Amino acid sequence: MDAEIKVWDAEKGQELLTLKPPEPGTAELGFSPDGKRLASAGLDNTVRVWDLKSGQELLVLKGHTDRVCCVCFSPDGKRLASASWDTTVRVWDAEKGRELLTLKGHTDRLRSVCFSPEGKRLASASNDKTVKVWSLDKEK
């Protein structure tokens, strides 16, 4: 069975686009603030960024060593955060695909990641029963 992400027009109930990430599939999705891109958290340890107009895969972000459970674009759309079962949060340049930062400190699988409204902090939640708030002032 092929893994698929279907994009729908919610008002018309029509399918607009089908994206085809590799098996074994996708854990979560996140829209860029401008609505032009979609990030997918992959069960294959990758993050993929898709163009929603053409359906083209723009970036494949590699660095996690276990499944990626969640993704979140920064408010300005220039960065993308990913959290993984490998206990790390990674921050990426959402346009070039370059890894900017790896955040370590959780001791169990990550479950959630989210930028603050101004984009200067990042919150992560883990199965280790902690929520961490990270300052992004020291990005590379």
Image (tube, rainbow, N blue to C red):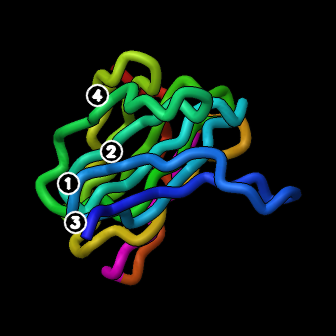
Where residue 57 appears, as percent x and y from the top left, is: 38, 32
Label 4–label 3 contact, CB within 8 A: no
Q: Residues within 10 Å of mark 3 (few under 14, many from 20)?
A: few
Label 4–label 2 contact, CB within 8 A: no
Pick whichever of labels 4 and 1 is earlier in the sequence.
1
Between 80 and 8, the one nearer to me in the picture = 8
Label 1–label 2 contact, CB within 8 A: no
Name the residue tied to disc 2. Answer: 47
**Is residue 122 a member of the stretch shown in magenta?**
yes
CA–CA distance in space, label 4 to label 3? 24 Å
Name the residue tied to disc 3. Answer: 24
Name the residue tied to disc 1. Answer: 45
Q: Magenta segment, principal secondary structure?
A: strand
**Amino acid at the residue labelled 1:** Asn
Q: Nearer the viewer, mark 4 or mark 1?
A: 1
Q: Which residues are magenta?
A: 121-128
Give residue 99's mark. 4
Where residue 71 appears, as percent x and y from the top left, is: 46, 51
